[in-house]
Image (tube, rainbow, N blue to C red):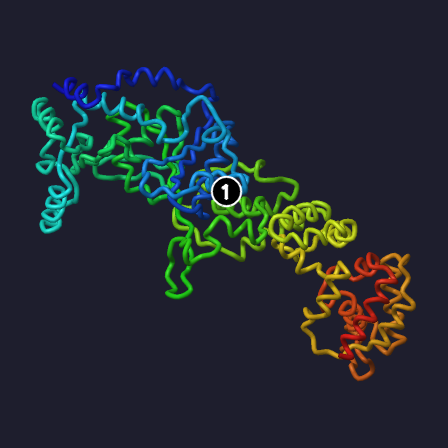
């Protein structure tokens, strides 16, 4: 009878599961190779949690010489947004999260979009019905609502199961009669589970997990014949030979259903790795909560690109979330990158990981400190051409000058760490370009000190651009003494009344004049790059500023 019902419901499905088993053979990979997938739904914008999940998919597949594929899971067509798929692929590309196979890329296991695989799902469902493991359910929405209300009053589990599953054992004649009367129906799993029994699985991140068996007759195919996510993902992960399902731990509660689906379909189950959510301490309530695209600007993927945070630096930050030992490794291995690190599920946090903006900023600064001036210039130019066209023109017109400034303090044991994002270059080095500095006109100066303009003029007169750094410093100490300043701070502190100040005050006055700031990278390098003519030009600008 079950075979007759299956043929009645799916007269156009003439293939069997064996057809697709042969169509999608085992992958030719090493035994330890991981096959991972990122399966986004085009129902909204991509946020940091999505990127983190995709990042983990990528790094684990890459280090095991496996496959990382992109599958668009668009079974929920009602919630799909216009341009949602293009948004997903665009953001993955922008964030250098690069699938090796899948939607928009190609491969032997497609189509990689679930809306194009309906016949495959119906083939497997027809087989389940034939084997007595699924059935058509003709319940109306009103009937289901009545069941739900009764279950709520009785404080029972919500769903269609047990004696509530009234269509479980319909005869062929009853099914045919319902179809001929035009009744809508869904296909439900005939769950073999017993909630009094338990299942146990080992999660790669969370360890051993125990659950009651799934016993609800879950919907497999909706009224329009399209699959639910639960069915589609199980069939796709099997046919695409996914070895590891890396996903957010909001899916932990679905494990009993997913395990049961793999069992009734006769599939080998992939290994699960459930990622703890990225959380934040709410500034209003003080409580720990999950990311909110509405409340947290940094939760949205676009924030990082638009604010100028390097994608490689964001990868470094995501790595610190992925493995607790990554940050220490990265700081100790200046000549290595992410590809050299071995990620391990056992080093992944089980609880929620709080978003740490300070850590992200420090990682970004470390990232920039390991780049030479030319690299920083080129990356900043790429960013500016996309988000700040005027500044991009400034950079192109002053390339050599900017590279020289960006190279200051790059060769020593403790390279400069004053840049955390590409937009900082414009902010931190605005004094490098004359036209920008003139427009700025000392507006970034946070000092109320009085500076001796005549003293600075006398210094410029004796400045020698050919001096070595030691010669320069000895010359400025001698100049300071002649001007009534102590040659060092220690001597000044012994008897401040003897001096106008110390050599550091003289350097500060020069620094303020040429940069408009009381703090800057190495002054010797700045003076050498600018040269005497520009120093005199800036002296005149400083005079006007002081006299206004």
Residue 361, given in percent of the width and then of the height, sits at 57, 55
Question: Tag 1, which secondary structure?
Answer: helix
Q: Is 193 on the left or on the right of 267, as rendered?
A: left
**530 and 394: which one is in front?**
394
Residue 24, given in percent of the width and then of the height, sits at 39, 19
Residue 140, given in percent of the width and then of the height, sits at 13, 39
Q: Which residue is drawn at 88% across and 65% down?
A: 474
Does residue 465 lie above or below 19 as drawn?
below
Does residue 54 lie above or below 31 as drawn?
below
Q: Residue furthest bottom?
A: 497
Residue 293, given in percent of the width and then of the height, sits at 42, 53
Q: Splitting the image into 4 quarters, where does residue 204 fall? A: top left
Query: How many numbered circles does the render carry?
Result: 1
Quadrant (top left/top right/bottom left/bottom right) for the C terminus: bottom right
Q: Is 199 on the left or on the right of 350, as rendered?
A: left
Does residue 477 lie above or below 324 as drawn?
below
Q: Is 45 on the left or on the right of 217, as rendered?
A: right
Q: How packed is label 1: few (under 14 Cα within 10 Å), some, or many (20 or more)?
A: some
Residue topped by disc 1: 91
Quadrant (top left/top right/bottom left/bottom right) for the N terminus: top left
Q: Residue at x 53, y 48 (%)?
A: 317
Q: Which residue is drawn at 46% across and 44% down?
A: 52
């Amino acid at each position: 009878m079950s075979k007759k019902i299956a043929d009645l419901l799916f007269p156009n499905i003439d293939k069997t599961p064996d057809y697709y088993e042969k169509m999608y053979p085992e992958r030719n990979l090493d035994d330890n190779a991981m096959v991972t997938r990122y399966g986004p739904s085009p129902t909204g914008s991509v946020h940091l949690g999505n990127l983190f999940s995709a990042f983990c998919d990528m790094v684990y597949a890459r280090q095991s010489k496996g496959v990382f594929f992109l599958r668009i899971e668009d079974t929920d067509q009602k919630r799909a947004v216009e341009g949602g798929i293009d948004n997903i692929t665009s953001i993955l590309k922008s964030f250098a999260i690069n699938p090796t196979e899948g939607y928009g890329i190609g491969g032997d296991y497609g189509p990689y979009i679930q809306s194009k695989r309906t016949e495959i799902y119906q083939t497997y469902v027809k087989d389940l019905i034939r084997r007595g493991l699924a059935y058509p359910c003709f319940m109306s929405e009103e009937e289901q609502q009545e069941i739900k209300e009764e279950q709520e009053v009785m404080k029972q589990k919500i769903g269609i199961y047990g004696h509530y599953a009234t269509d479980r054992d319909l005869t062929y004649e009853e099914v045919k009669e319902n179809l001929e009367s035009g009744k809508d129906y869904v296909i439900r799993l005939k769950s073999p589970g017993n909630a009094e029994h338990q299942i146990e699985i080992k999660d790669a991140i969370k360890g051993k997990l125990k659950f009651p068996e799934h016993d609800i007759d879950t919907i497999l195919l909706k009224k329009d014949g399209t699959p639910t996510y639960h069915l589609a993902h199980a069939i796709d992960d099997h046919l695409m030979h996914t070895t590891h399902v890396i996903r957010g731990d909001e899916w932990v509660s679905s494990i009993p259903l997913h395990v049961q689906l793999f069992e009734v379909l006769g599939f080998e189950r992939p290994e699960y790795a459930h990622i703890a959510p990225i959380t934040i301490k709410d500034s209003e309530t003080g409580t720990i909560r999950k990311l909110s695209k509405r409340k947290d600007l940094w939760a949205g993927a676009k924030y990082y690109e638009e604010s100028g945070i390097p994608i490689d630096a964001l990868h470094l930050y995501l790595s610190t979330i992925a493995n607790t030992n990554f940050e220490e490794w990265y700081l100790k291995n200046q000549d290595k990158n992410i590809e050299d690190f071995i990620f391990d599920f056992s080093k992944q946090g089980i609880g929620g990981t709080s978003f740490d903006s300070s850590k992200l900023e420090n990682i970004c600064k470390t990232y920039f400190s390991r780049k030479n001036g030319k690299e920083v210039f080129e990356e900043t130019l790429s960013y500016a051409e996309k988000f700040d066209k005027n500044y991009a023109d400034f950079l192109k017109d002053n390339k050599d000058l900017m590279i020289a400034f960006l190279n200051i303090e790059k060769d020593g044991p403790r390279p400069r760490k004053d840049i955390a994002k590409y937009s900082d270059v414009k902010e931190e080095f605005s004094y490098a370009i004359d036209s920008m500095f003139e427009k700025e006109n000392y507006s970034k100066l946070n000092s109320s000190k009085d500076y001796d303009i005549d003293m600075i003029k006398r210094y410029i007169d004796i400045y020698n651009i050919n001096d070595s750094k030691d010669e320069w410093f000895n010359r400025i100490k001698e100049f300071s003494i002649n001007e009534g300043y102590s040659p060092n701070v220690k001597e000044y502190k012994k008897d401040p009344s003897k001096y106008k100040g110390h050599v550091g005050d003289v350097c500060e006055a020069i620094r303020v004049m040429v940069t408009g700031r009381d703090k800057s990278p190495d002054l010797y390098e700045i003076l050498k790059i600018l040269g005497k003519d520009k120093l005199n030009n800036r002296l005149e600008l400083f005079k006007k500023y002081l006299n206004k």
